[in-house]
Amino acid sequence: MSAQLGFKAIQMINESLAPIIKSGKRIDRIKLVVCPTSPIAQATVVDTMYGLLLVVPGEYVKKGISYLIESPMTRGGIGFNWVSKQAVAK
């Protein structure tokens, strides 16, 4: 199921994804790790300007935090980047 995200969220993902893709990594090896209680965690993929991106709920990821990671990691290039790293206060 593809997530219906707002323009700002897609823009943040695309901006964080750009250096990873430009460093030679493939979109099919990259995961978006999000908080399990986040609305985006209900989706399996997000449609980005680089293609479909797999969404994975992270057991230890707090709400408001998300990151991109290549899995499995390969040599060279960039394999990790933050999308959002500011936790939401309860």
Image: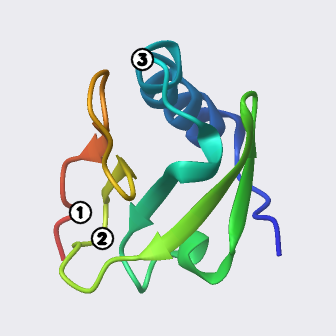
Q: Which residue does the numbered mark 1 point to in the structure image?
A: 88
Q: Which residue does the numbered mark 3 point to in the structure image?
A: 19
Q: Residue at x 30, y 26 (%)?
A: 78
Disc 3 from disc 2: Cα separation = 24 Å
Is tag 1's residue or tag 3's residue first in the polypeptide sequence?
A: 3
Disc 1 from disc 2: Cα separation = 6 Å
User: In the image, is residue 24 above or below residue 25?
Assistant: above
Q: Position of residue 50 (x, y in %)?
A: 72, 30
Q: Quadrant of residue 87?
A: bottom left
- The mark closer to the camera, 1 or 3, is 3
Callout 1–callout 3 Cβ contact below 8 Å: no
Label annotation for residue 25: none
Amino acid type indicated by mark 3: Pro
Q: Quadrant of residue 81?
A: top left
Amino acid type indicated by mark 2: Lys
**Quadrant (top left, top right, bottom left, bottom right) of the N terminus:** bottom right
